Image (spheres, helix red, strand yellow):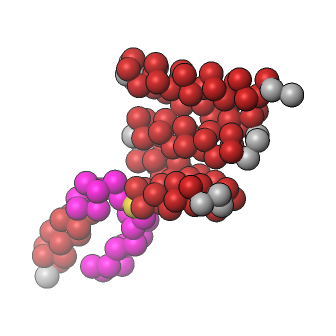
Amino acid sequence: MCVALARHNDLVRDAIESHDGFVFKTVGDAFGAAFVRATEDLGLRAKAQGEYEPARAYLEESLLLRRQLGNQFEVAASLNNLGLVAREQGDYKRTRADYQESLSIRRGLEDKARAQGQRMTMEEGVAYAMEP
């Protein structure tokens, strides 16, 4: 039975992680898991509806999960989304910080095409920050 449970747990864990999930608890054959994309999607939907505080909360949770998973490209995407929310809220200092960290990560990954697109977005954030 122990071998079967171990095999089951390996299969379930692999399935969760292959779908950008994060296992935070296991008890016997039960798993507690969070899925980054679902959290990110909730944040982006809240932003689209003008619900910026819930959007920020979901996106920050997604960022935390992505940092734990170690996917730097996805961390950069989460930071970019947080920058978009900050811009909508008029928090241009935070917008700039989020965009700069995202850009730094993307440059570190040498994803030049993405970094070029990110740079334009950051410049928009800086332009908004300079407006009276």
Q: Which is more toward the observer, 112 or 18?
A: 112
Q: Residue at x 43, y 35 (%)?
A: 72
Tally of numbered discs: 0
Q: Where residue 2 appears, x then y in whole percent?
A: 17, 77
Give the residues in magenta.
14-34
87 vs 118, left or right, is: right
111 vs 104, left or right, is: left
Q: Which is more toward the observer, 69 or 85?
A: 85
Q: Which is more toward the observer, 3 or 9?
A: 9
In the image, residue 122 sits, relative to residue 35, either above or below, namely above
Q: Residue at x 63, y 26 (%)?
A: 124
Quadrant location of residue 4?
bottom left
Q: Which is more toward the observer, 17 or 5?
A: 17
Residue 119 in view, yes or no: yes
Q: Is residue 15 magenta?
A: yes
Quadrant location of residue 132?
top right
In the image, residue 51 sits, relative to residue 69, either above or below, namely below
Q: Where residue 1 appears, x then y in whole percent?
A: 13, 82
Q: Where residue 58 appears, x then y in whole percent?
A: 57, 59
